[in-house]
Image: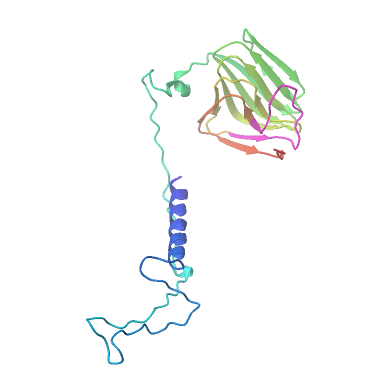
Amino acid sequence: MRRLLFIALTVCAISALSYSCTSDDDSEVIDDSQTPTEPANPGGDGGTTGGGSSSTDETIDLDLNDFDIALDQTSLSETEVIPTDEAAEDYDDYIEHSDFTSEIAIVYSGASATVTGEVKGVEVTVSGGDVAVNSETKAVKYSLSGSATEGSFKIYSSKKFCLALNGVSLKNSDGAAINIQSSKSAFVVLGAGSENTLTDGTSYNTPDGEDEKATLFSEGQILFSGSGTLNVNGNKVSTR
């Protein structure tokens, strides 16, 4: 953000400068389209009177190519302060304050998926590479890995949950790659050193009564953390 802000400020400064040189101000009007004329001399032909002096209009020729734009290439560093006071408004928005004690692992391969782990109150349905979860249980983490040429992850949950992306690539030709049909918070954690890619289809086959608008869609807030990489490719063109 620091670099983008510096560039934005520099461009704005040039724009403002260009505008000020072609617009009226309170002291002088500069018009390049007219030939400068000698101002009227209230004192007649013999010079000036009353301490006044004669002057001529001056044309300013400004070439923006004469300006240099310096880019700030300083490496950005960010320090995050995690609140420790449970009364803090955003205390629950940090995964450090949530303990996900149960785990279900989902490994994708081509047009299929393998699920390991059983948690009471969690139902997992697999159809080819499409995985659907119905959960009434809290403190569950779902770990996704592997690559699906035709697959997706969809979840209905009445409790907040963790979605760990550990080097997963999902491509769904008829909908979102990850579809979170839950109003609860979803903690999306990008595994250290992992590269994750999500790709949706050009058209969606969305069930009646549901919404689905993006490659990574959620009815509730998504809280990202982790040091991995997430690539999101959107193919559907909105008609709204």
- Dominant secondary structure of the residues highlighted in magenta in the image: loop
Residue 39, placed above or below residue 189: below
Residue plotted at (45% across, 70% down): 66
Is residue 177 found left or right of 185 in the rendered image?
right
Residue 77: x and y in percent read 41, 41
Relative height, residue 82 to residue 25 (above, below) = above
State left or right for residue 151 relative to residue 86: right
* Image quadrant assignment for residue 28: bottom left
Q: Which residue is drawn at 61% across and 38% down?
A: 231
Q: Which residue is drawn at 63% across and 8% down?
A: 121
> What span is in magenta?
195-216
Report if residue 5 lies within the magenta region: no
Rendered view: 41 above or below 121 = below
Residue extending furthest bottom?
Answer: 46
In the rendered image, the quadrant that contains the C terminus is top right
Q: Position of residue 148 (x, y in %)?
A: 72, 30
Q: From the viewer's perspective, is 234 left or right of 33? A: right
Which quarter of the picture shows residue 200? top right
Residue lying farthest to the top in this orientation = 120
Residue 209 horizontal/vertical position (percent) = 72, 21
Q: Which residue is drawn at 66% across and 28% down?
A: 178
User: Dividing the picture into quarters, in which one does residue 151 lie?
Assistant: top right
Q: Position of residue 142 (x, y in %)?
A: 60, 20
